Amino acid sequence: MTQFYLGVDVGGTKTHALVADETGQVRGGAQGGTGSWEAIGYDGLTRVLSDVIQRACQMAGILPGQLAGSGLGLAGYDWPSQTEAHRKACWDAGLNEPIRVVNDAVLGILAGAEEGWGISIVSGTGCNCRGWNRDHSHEGRVVGGWGEWSGEAAGGFDILARAMRAVVFEWNQRGPATQLSQAFLRHTGAIDLDDLVEGLYLRRYHFDPAMVMLVFEIAHAGDVQAVEVMRWAGEQLGGMALGVVNQLRLRDQSFDVVLIGSIYDGHPLIQSALEETIQREAPGARLVRLAVPPVVGGVLLGMEAAGQEFIPRRSRLVESTRAFFAKEVDR
C-alpha cells in the first residue's frame, strides 16, 4: 500500500504544502497566504493549514487522515512554550499523528544539507539562524531575528540602517563621504543631507526596500563605505552561525551551512565574509545555497516523524519538487 507524507512551510508571506509518496515522488501541492500566528493568530493558522492541506491532499487523491507522517515548519514558532498551541493548530486542521513541528528555518537544513543536518542562515527582510546535530537530538538557535538588541542584525533593513549610519557619519563629520548619501538624496527627493537626516528623524521621509537595493548598487560600484556594509553583514551572519556551532559543538566536524534568502544575491562579499568568519572557528563548514523550496524539508521531516529513513528518498523528492513547481508556474 502506498504511503504518503506531507510537508508544510508556513512563512511570513506565504504557505506551501506538498504531498509525496514513499519514493519521494510529489503527488500534490498547494499554496496559501501567511499562516504565522504573529500575523493572523492561532485560529488563522488553523484555517490556512486546513486549506492548503486539504487542497494538496485532494490533488494527491487522498484524505488528510491517510497521511503516514507530517512535517511542518512554522514561522513564529520560536520557543518551547509555544509548542502546545502550534500542535493544537495542526490537530484542529485535521492532521493525525505522527506530526513533527519545527521553526520554519529548520526546514532549510533538511532541504539543503546533503545529509539532512547542519546549520541554516536566513537573510531576507530579517534574519534567523538554526542548527541541528547529526541525529537531530539537539537544536541550536539564535533568538529569532530580533535585530540589534539580540545581536541579529543582518537582514535587509539592518543593512539599510548600517548604510544610513555611514550617511549620517558624513553629515556630522564622524566619517568620510560616501556615494550612499547622493543615492539616498535622489531616492527620497531630499534637498541636501540636512534635509535628509532631519526628514528621516521627523518621518517626512521613510526607509523602504528599494533603498536596500541602492546599497547593493553602490557597493558594486566600489564605494568604500557601502563595501564595508557588505563585509559587516557577512560577519554578522557568520557570527550568528558560530553561536550555533558552539551550541552544537560542531567546531571539529564537517557540516553544511545552508544559505537562505535574497540578501545573498545582493553582493558576493556578504557570502565570502560569512564564510571566512565561520571557517576561522569551524574549518569544516561548507556553504550551500538553498536551491529548492524549503517545503521539501517538511516532507523529509514527515518521513522522519513516521520512522522512515529519508536520505535515500531525498534526491527523488528534490527532482520531483522542481518539476512540480515548474509545472505550476507554467499553468
Image (cartoon, grey):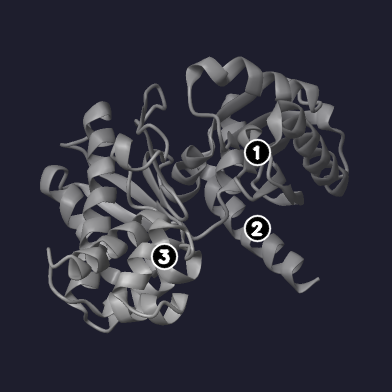
Q: Residues within 10 Å of mark 2 (few under 14, many from 20)?
A: some
Instruction: Tell me where residue 34 sits by quadrant.
Output: top right
SS class of the residue under badge 1?
helix
User: Please, what secondary structure does the residue beneath circle 3 have?
Assistant: helix
Q: What residue is at 75 percent from the left and 21 percent from the top? A: 91
Instruction: Tell me which residue sits at (70%, 36%) in the image.
Output: 40
Q: Residues within 10 Å of mark 1 (few under 14, many from 20)?
A: some
Q: Secondary structure at mark 2?
A: helix
Q: Amino acid at mark 3?
A: Gly
The residue mark sitting in front, 2 or 1, is 1
Residue type of the residue flagged with mark 2: Ser
Q: CA distance from mark 3 to mark 2?
A: 51 Å
Measuring from the top left, give residue 309's x and y in whole percent: 53, 33
Looking at marks 2 and 1 on the same chain, the residue that comes earlier in the sequence is marked by 1
**Dot placed on the residue nearer the N-terminal end, 1 or 3:** 1
The spot of residue 46 in percent (x, y) is: 76, 30
In this picture, residue 316 sits left or right of residue 185: right
Query: Image point 46% across, 79% down: which residue?
Result: 189
**What residue did someone put label 2 on?**
320
Q: Is residue 228 left or right of residue 108?
A: left
Residue that label 1 marks? 39
Quarter of the image with the N terminus in it? top right
Disc 1 residue type (three-letter): Ala
